Image (tube, rainbow, N blue to C red):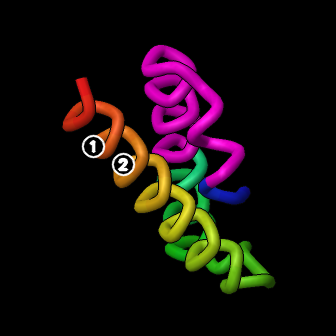
Amino acid sequence: MKASELRDKDQAALAKELSDLLKAQFSLRMQIATQQLNNTAQLKKVRRDIARVKTVMNQKGAKQ
C-alpha cells in the first residue's frame, strides 16, 4: 500500500483501513505465538502499513 493511495481516502475509510490492519496484526501475532506463521516478513509489512495510515490520518487532521 502506498501513501499516495491513502491520501485519496477520507477519514472514515482510513479509520476502517486502520481497524483492518490492526486485526491483521493481531492475527499474525497469534500465528507467530502458535508457530503457524511461515513468512514472518508479513508482520513487518503490516506494521509499516499501520504507521502509514496513522501518518496520513495525522496529516489530514492537521490540515483541517
- Mark 2: which amino acid? Lys
Distance from label 1 to label 2 (Cα)? 6 Å
Extreme residue in the right direction: 38
Q: Which of 1 and 9 is in front in this view?
A: 9
- Mark 1: which amino acid? Asn
| Secondary structure of the residue carrying numbered label 1 | helix
Residue 32 falls in image quadrant: bottom right
In the displayed structure, would residue 37 be above or below residue 21? below
- Would residue 29 be found to the left or right of residue 39 on screen? left
Q: Which residue is drawn at 72% across and 73% down?
A: 36
Q: Give the residue at mark 1.
A: 58
Extreme residue in the front direction: 63
Tag 1–tag 2 contact (CB < 8 Å): yes
Q: Nearer the viewer, residue 18 or 28?
A: 18
Q: Nearer the viewer, mark 1 or mark 2?
A: 1
Q: Which of 43 and 59 is in front in this view?
A: 59
- Would residue 39 be found to the left or right of residue 6 on screen? right
Report x, y in % for residue 43: 59, 73
Magenta segment, which residues?
4-23
Q: How crowded is mark 2: few (under 14 residues within 10 Å), some or many (20 or more)?
A: some
Q: Main secondary structure of the magenta part?
A: helix
| Secondary structure of the residue carrying numbered label 2 | helix
Q: Does the magenta stretch include residue 46?
A: no
- Would residue 41 be found to the left or right of residue 14 on screen? right
Q: Give the residue at mark 2.
A: 54
In the displayed structure, would residue 36 be above or below residue 8? below
In the displayed structure, would residue 63 be above or below residue 45? above
Q: Is residue 14 magenta?
A: yes
Residue 1 falls in image quadrant: bottom right
